[in-house]
Amino acid sequence: MRILILTLVSAAAPLLYGEEPRQDLLSFANGDQLHGRLSGIAAGPSIQWKRDDVGEAVKFKSSELRRIVLRGGRSAKSIDSFSHIGTSNGDRIPGVVREMDDKRVVLDTSFGGMIEIPRDQVGLIAPNPLGGRVLYLGPYDPEEWVIIDNNHPDGISALKVDEKDKMPTWKHSGSSWYWQNKETGTALAKKAGMPDRAILRFDIAWKRTLSCAIAFHSNFKQAKQVVADEGEDDVQAGARKMMAGKVMNSTSLPDIFGDSYVLQIYSNFVMLHRTSFDKDGKPRLDRMETTNSTMRLGDTGKATVEIRCNRPTGEIALFINGQFAAQWSEVAGEDGAGGYAGKGDGFGFLVQSEDSPVRISEVVVAEWNGMPDAARSLQVEDSDIVLLSNGTDRFSGKVTGLSQGKLKLEGRYGDFEFPINEIAEVRFAKSRIAKAPDVPSDEMKTRLYPLGRISGRPLVGDSSNLRIMNGALGEIDINLDYAVMLEFQETESFLDDWDEEF
């Protein structure tokens, strides 16, 4: 029996261990920002905002707001399981399914107790999503990331960059990283967090041209460190590094990410490279062959990218928007030319085209159980799909119910019962899912930590609790200790975070 184990990632740790909470951040629709504390939510809806330098709470209409980032993106409590359901309107509601029949699904949640959901509004049940522990979800806290260029090979916090550095940099807003510079040359990196068998998933949006390098299993080892081992002194090593030029492009990828794999993704094709150094300390960039490298992503758009990599076996697979895109396989060996080149547990991003804005969001790092595909790719019109957490077994038919920890399925060749702890995902037949309710103009989304997104019209609340009206579920109470952000608008106008003066 497989049990999902929750690892508390560092973004929540300071609150859990007693550090003084950070202030909330209020972002307006026009791009303005205001620090303070959320003190209440009233019908209208309106937001009550408190600052130490203002006596009374100030009220703002929700139509004036874009989002509220709570406690600097750190939750006071963490959802204790990554089990969740997906509803017809795109919500992801974390909780454990206790009962299910043809009329309802009963979900046991940390943030709001027992919730009853109409069965025809549920498109997904995921008792063990991704097949293993989720180790990171964000980016809510920019301090966990660094930016790297030739002047800062060890990395520097984006929050510490000032005008005297004269460097193009990544900017953090809400729960996303933005690259909005005319030139290239600065990488965004998280130097730890990837296990040996890992899933790295993220959303990427771009304008004009997509040309982005994504490194994984990186150790960020610098050329200077490598050549020093071979007898070259620091002055010689430094001189060679400076010869790489001021702009970090493909030829300098080893100097950025060290021993690593780097996926270069463009609008119409992808390439995967090994980055390493030879015995003389010179950078190596070796392209890996694949049977399919073509893509159709367009000049402006967005996509969900998922990289699955297995250091012990050498398997690497790429999925775009839930669909298989390409795969690679390494052979046994110890040097940079063979075996698994990625020697570390970090990952990073580098935009490689000039004047190409990019947004990185919804970053997830999880353990991979070797599952070759997802139930999403098998979702069909008239059959439910049950995908087991062993990564290989899947069954189709009609799910008739769930009780006492077992899911029942009527299949073509017989009836089955599966322990819920052995199921990765259940994707319900499209024909049995009702149309999502209309979205009210004053709807907002609550993002929970480390997993969960619940939409609804705000009714009433204070700094600790919120009551919303969800079109499919009715009234829901949400304990905001589990929340990291309230979203009021998702815009793509010239006033949103794509603007250079956001």
Image (cartoon, grey):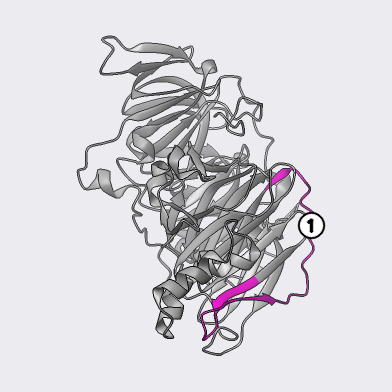
Reply above or below: 154 against 45: below
Among all residues in the image, which is located at the extreme left? Answer: 18
Highlighted range, magenta: 273-302
Amino acid bearing label 1? Asn
Q: Which residue has dot 1 on it? A: 268
**Residue shown at 63%/56% (left/top)?**
305
Q: Residue extending furthest bottom?
A: 333
Any magenta on residue 420?
no
Residue 51 percent across, percent down from the top left: 30, 18
Quarter-of-image position of residue 213? bottom right
Residue 112 visible from this viewpoint: no
For residue 145, say whether it is visible: yes
Q: Is residue 282 left or right of residue 229?
A: right
10 Å crowding of disc 1: few (<14), some (14-19), many (20+):
some
* Quadrant (top left/top right/bottom left/bottom right) for the N terminus: bottom left
Q: Is residue 11 above or below residue 283?
A: above
Does residue 244 appear to the left or right of 485 in the view shown?
right
Residue 287: within the magenta?
yes
